Image (cartoon, rainbow, N blue to C red):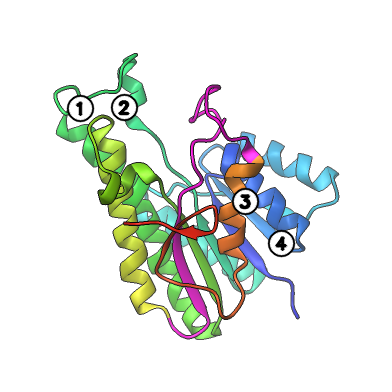
Amino acid sequence: MEQRIAVVTGANRGLGLQTARELAMRGYRAVLGSRDMAKADAAAADLRAAGLEVHATLLDVRSDAIVETFVSAVKDEHGRIDVLVNNAGSIVEADLGHGAPPSTSDVPAEMILRAFDNNAVGAYRLCRSVLPLMNAAGYGRIVNVSSGMGALNEMVDGWPAYRISKAALNAVTRIFAAEAGSGVKINSVCPGWVRTDMGGANAPRDIEEGAAGIVWAATLPDDGPSGGFFRDRQSIAW
Protein backbone atom coordinates (compact mmCIF):
# COMPACT_ATOMS: atom_id res chain seq x y z
CA MET A 1 0.00 0.00 0.00
CA GLU A 2 1.21 3.48 -0.85
CA GLN A 3 2.03 5.81 2.02
CA ARG A 4 -1.04 7.71 3.21
CA ILE A 5 -1.04 11.52 3.07
CA ALA A 6 -2.53 13.26 6.11
CA VAL A 7 -3.31 16.99 6.26
CA VAL A 8 -3.70 18.55 9.71
CA THR A 9 -4.80 22.17 10.01
CA GLY A 10 -3.69 24.44 12.83
CA ALA A 11 -0.76 22.06 13.24
CA ASN A 12 2.07 24.28 14.46
CA ARG A 13 1.23 23.58 18.13
CA GLY A 14 -1.13 21.86 20.55
CA LEU A 15 -3.55 19.18 19.44
CA GLY A 16 -2.81 19.72 15.77
CA LEU A 17 0.90 19.18 16.21
CA GLN A 18 0.39 16.14 18.44
CA THR A 19 -2.04 14.64 15.93
CA ALA A 20 0.44 15.17 13.09
CA ARG A 21 3.20 13.62 15.21
CA GLU A 22 1.15 10.52 16.00
CA LEU A 23 0.01 10.03 12.42
CA ALA A 24 3.60 10.36 11.21
CA MET A 25 4.66 7.80 13.82
CA ARG A 26 2.10 5.45 12.25
CA GLY A 27 3.75 5.85 8.86
CA TYR A 28 1.65 8.65 7.39
CA ARG A 29 3.25 11.55 5.55
CA ALA A 30 1.93 14.49 7.56
CA VAL A 31 1.32 17.93 6.08
CA LEU A 32 1.20 20.66 8.72
CA GLY A 33 -1.09 23.49 7.65
CA SER A 34 -0.56 26.73 9.55
CA ARG A 35 -0.94 30.51 9.29
CA ASP A 36 2.37 30.96 11.15
CA MET A 37 4.99 29.47 8.87
CA ALA A 38 7.90 30.24 11.20
CA LYS A 39 6.32 28.13 13.94
CA ALA A 40 5.19 25.47 11.49
CA ASP A 41 8.65 25.16 9.96
CA ALA A 42 10.19 24.86 13.43
CA ALA A 43 7.65 22.20 14.43
CA ALA A 44 8.24 20.27 11.20
CA ALA A 45 12.00 20.42 11.70
CA ASP A 46 11.63 18.97 15.21
CA LEU A 47 9.52 16.10 13.92
CA ARG A 48 11.90 15.41 11.03
CA ALA A 49 14.78 15.33 13.51
CA ALA A 50 12.90 12.51 15.23
CA GLY A 51 12.84 10.60 11.93
CA LEU A 52 9.26 11.45 10.96
CA GLU A 53 8.13 12.48 7.49
CA VAL A 54 6.38 15.83 7.74
CA HIS A 55 6.00 18.95 5.61
CA ALA A 56 4.83 22.44 6.56
CA THR A 57 2.61 24.45 4.21
CA LEU A 58 0.94 27.85 4.52
CA LEU A 59 -2.77 27.63 5.26
CA ASP A 60 -5.31 30.16 6.46
CA VAL A 61 -8.69 28.42 6.66
CA ARG A 62 -10.45 31.81 6.60
CA SER A 63 -9.47 32.43 2.96
CA ASP A 64 -11.10 30.71 -0.02
CA ALA A 65 -8.12 31.50 -2.23
CA ILE A 66 -5.50 30.25 0.23
CA VAL A 67 -7.45 27.04 0.88
CA GLU A 68 -7.71 26.35 -2.84
CA THR A 69 -4.00 27.05 -3.34
CA PHE A 70 -3.12 24.85 -0.36
CA VAL A 71 -5.15 21.86 -1.56
CA SER A 72 -3.77 22.17 -5.09
CA ALA A 73 -0.21 22.39 -3.77
CA VAL A 74 -0.62 19.31 -1.56
CA LYS A 75 -2.18 17.35 -4.40
CA ASP A 76 0.56 18.40 -6.84
CA GLU A 77 3.38 17.57 -4.42
CA HIS A 78 2.03 14.44 -2.75
CA GLY A 79 -0.42 13.09 -5.33
CA ARG A 80 -3.53 12.95 -3.16
CA ILE A 81 -5.01 13.61 0.29
CA ASP A 82 -6.09 10.55 2.27
CA VAL A 83 -6.75 12.15 5.66
CA LEU A 84 -7.92 15.63 6.60
CA VAL A 85 -8.02 16.73 10.24
CA ASN A 86 -9.82 20.05 10.59
CA ASN A 87 -8.20 21.12 13.84
CA ALA A 88 -7.73 24.87 13.27
CA GLY A 89 -9.92 26.81 15.64
CA SER A 90 -9.97 29.44 18.35
CA ILE A 91 -11.94 30.78 21.29
CA VAL A 92 -12.47 34.35 20.16
CA GLU A 93 -14.02 35.30 23.52
CA ALA A 94 -10.54 35.06 24.98
CA ASP A 95 -9.93 38.49 23.42
CA LEU A 96 -12.36 39.94 25.97
CA GLY A 97 -10.07 39.08 28.85
CA HIS A 98 -12.93 38.10 31.17
CA GLY A 99 -12.27 36.03 34.23
CA ALA A 100 -15.79 34.60 34.20
CA PRO A 101 -17.34 32.85 31.18
CA PRO A 102 -18.60 35.60 28.84
CA SER A 103 -22.34 35.74 28.22
CA THR A 104 -24.35 36.91 25.24
CA SER A 105 -24.38 40.43 26.68
CA ASP A 106 -20.56 40.43 26.49
CA VAL A 107 -20.22 39.01 22.98
CA PRO A 108 -21.19 41.18 19.99
CA ALA A 109 -22.48 39.65 16.76
CA GLU A 110 -19.21 40.47 15.01
CA MET A 111 -17.43 38.10 17.37
CA ILE A 112 -19.91 35.33 16.56
CA LEU A 113 -19.20 35.80 12.86
CA ARG A 114 -15.45 35.69 13.45
CA ALA A 115 -15.71 32.45 15.39
CA PHE A 116 -18.10 31.00 12.81
CA ASP A 117 -15.71 31.76 9.94
CA ASN A 118 -12.68 30.30 11.66
CA ASN A 119 -14.18 27.30 13.45
CA ALA A 120 -16.93 26.16 11.07
CA VAL A 121 -16.65 27.78 7.65
CA GLY A 122 -12.91 27.08 7.60
CA ALA A 123 -13.63 23.36 7.88
CA TYR A 124 -16.36 23.73 5.25
CA ARG A 125 -13.82 25.25 2.85
CA LEU A 126 -11.40 22.37 3.33
CA CYS A 127 -14.08 19.68 3.13
CA ARG A 128 -15.50 21.21 -0.02
CA SER A 129 -12.07 21.13 -1.69
CA VAL A 130 -10.90 17.76 -0.40
CA LEU A 131 -14.00 15.54 -0.45
CA PRO A 132 -14.21 15.34 -4.27
CA LEU A 133 -10.61 14.04 -4.31
CA MET A 134 -11.41 11.42 -1.70
CA ASN A 135 -14.62 10.36 -3.42
CA ALA A 136 -12.75 9.95 -6.68
CA ALA A 137 -10.05 7.88 -4.97
CA GLY A 138 -12.56 5.75 -3.07
CA TYR A 139 -10.81 6.37 0.25
CA GLY A 140 -10.69 9.16 2.80
CA ARG A 141 -10.95 10.09 6.45
CA ILE A 142 -12.07 13.56 7.57
CA VAL A 143 -12.04 14.47 11.25
CA ASN A 144 -13.63 17.70 12.41
CA VAL A 145 -12.24 18.58 15.84
CA SER A 146 -15.34 19.72 17.67
CA SER A 147 -16.31 20.10 21.33
CA GLY A 148 -18.97 18.98 23.76
CA MET A 149 -19.58 22.71 24.20
CA GLY A 150 -21.13 22.62 20.73
CA ALA A 151 -23.51 19.77 21.52
CA LEU A 152 -27.13 20.93 21.58
CA ASN A 153 -27.82 18.14 24.03
CA GLU A 154 -25.43 19.75 26.54
CA MET A 155 -25.89 23.40 25.58
CA VAL A 156 -25.85 25.88 28.48
CA ASP A 157 -24.79 29.50 28.90
CA GLY A 158 -21.35 31.05 28.49
CA TRP A 159 -18.92 31.23 25.55
CA PRO A 160 -21.66 31.77 22.93
CA ALA A 161 -19.35 32.34 19.96
CA TYR A 162 -17.40 29.16 20.61
CA ARG A 163 -20.51 27.10 21.29
CA ILE A 164 -22.40 28.31 18.22
CA SER A 165 -19.40 27.81 15.93
CA LYS A 166 -18.81 24.25 17.16
CA ALA A 167 -22.51 23.40 16.76
CA ALA A 168 -22.18 24.64 13.18
CA LEU A 169 -19.06 22.50 12.72
CA ASN A 170 -21.10 19.46 13.70
CA ALA A 171 -23.60 20.39 10.99
CA VAL A 172 -20.70 20.53 8.52
CA THR A 173 -19.81 16.98 9.53
CA ARG A 174 -23.32 15.70 8.96
CA ILE A 175 -23.77 17.39 5.58
CA PHE A 176 -20.46 16.22 4.12
CA ALA A 177 -20.83 12.72 5.58
CA ALA A 178 -24.10 12.46 3.63
CA GLU A 179 -22.20 13.37 0.44
CA ALA A 180 -19.26 11.06 1.11
CA GLY A 181 -18.74 8.21 -1.30
CA SER A 182 -17.93 4.62 -0.51
CA GLY A 183 -14.73 4.33 1.48
CA VAL A 184 -14.86 7.87 2.91
CA LYS A 185 -15.53 8.40 6.63
CA ILE A 186 -16.34 11.84 8.09
CA ASN A 187 -16.82 12.37 11.82
CA SER A 188 -16.76 14.98 14.57
CA VAL A 189 -14.52 14.31 17.57
CA CYS A 190 -14.55 16.02 20.95
CA PRO A 191 -11.04 15.67 22.42
CA GLY A 192 -12.19 16.79 25.86
CA TRP A 193 -10.68 19.63 27.86
CA VAL A 194 -6.96 19.41 27.11
CA ARG A 195 -3.92 21.15 28.55
CA THR A 196 -2.86 23.28 25.58
CA ASP A 197 -2.34 27.01 25.06
CA MET A 198 -6.06 27.24 24.33
CA GLY A 199 -7.24 24.81 27.01
CA GLY A 200 -5.07 26.22 29.76
CA ALA A 201 -3.06 24.67 32.56
CA ASN A 202 -6.10 23.55 34.60
CA ALA A 203 -7.47 21.21 31.93
CA PRO A 204 -7.68 17.60 33.17
CA ARG A 205 -6.40 15.90 30.01
CA ASP A 206 -2.87 15.82 28.67
CA ILE A 207 -2.10 16.30 25.01
CA GLU A 208 -1.79 12.57 24.28
CA GLU A 209 -5.24 11.88 25.75
CA GLY A 210 -6.71 14.69 23.69
CA ALA A 211 -5.19 13.51 20.42
CA ALA A 212 -6.08 9.84 20.90
CA GLY A 213 -9.69 10.12 19.70
CA ILE A 214 -8.70 12.30 16.76
CA VAL A 215 -6.07 9.82 15.60
CA TRP A 216 -8.57 6.97 16.04
CA ALA A 217 -11.08 8.69 13.74
CA ALA A 218 -8.34 9.56 11.24
CA THR A 219 -7.30 5.91 10.95
CA LEU A 220 -10.67 4.14 11.02
CA PRO A 221 -10.90 0.76 9.29
CA ASP A 222 -13.16 0.25 6.30
CA ASP A 223 -16.05 -0.84 8.52
CA GLY A 224 -15.69 2.18 10.83
CA PRO A 225 -18.47 4.70 11.51
CA SER A 226 -19.22 7.85 9.55
CA GLY A 227 -21.39 10.87 10.27
CA GLY A 228 -21.04 10.55 14.04
CA PHE A 229 -19.93 12.57 17.05
CA PHE A 230 -17.40 10.87 19.33
CA ARG A 231 -15.48 11.32 22.55
CA ASP A 232 -12.99 8.67 23.68
CA ARG A 233 -14.10 6.54 20.72
CA GLN A 234 -17.65 6.46 22.07
CA SER A 235 -20.65 7.99 20.33
CA ILE A 236 -22.08 11.07 22.09
CA ALA A 237 -25.28 13.00 21.51
CA TRP A 238 -25.38 15.93 19.12
Residue 212 marker: 3
Looking at the picture, which amino acid does disc 4 mark? Arg
Callout 2 crowding tier (Cα within 10 Å): few <14, some 14–19, many ≥20: many
Q: Residue at x 55, y 83 (%)?
A: 137
Q: How far apart are marks 3 and 2 (CA)?
A: 27 Å
Q: Residue at x 36, y 70 (%)?
A: 176
Label 3 sits on a secondary structure element that is helix
The residue labelled by disc 2 is: 93
What is the magenta segment's predominant secondary structure?
loop
Callout 1 crowding tier (Cα within 10 Å): few <14, some 14–19, many ≥20: some
Report the quarter where the N terminus lies: bottom right
Foreground tag (3 vs 2): 3
Label 4 sits on a secondary structure element that is strand
Residue 71 pos. (x, y %): 51, 63
Above or below, 235 relative to 119: below
Choose between 99 and 107: the one closer to the eye: 99
Whether residue 193 appears in magenta in the rendering, the answer is yes
Looking at the picture, which amino acid does disc 2 mark? Glu
Q: Earlier in the sequence, mark 4 or mark 2?
A: 4
Looking at the picture, which amino acid does disc 1 mark? Val
Report the quarter where the C terminus lies: bottom left
Foreground tag (4 vs 2): 2
Foreground tag (3 vs 4): 3
Q: Distance between the residues labelled 4 and 2?
A: 34 Å
The residue labelled by disc 1 is: 107
Label 1 with label 3: CB-CB less than 8 Å: no
The residue labelled by disc 4 is: 29
Range of residues picked out in magenta: 181-207
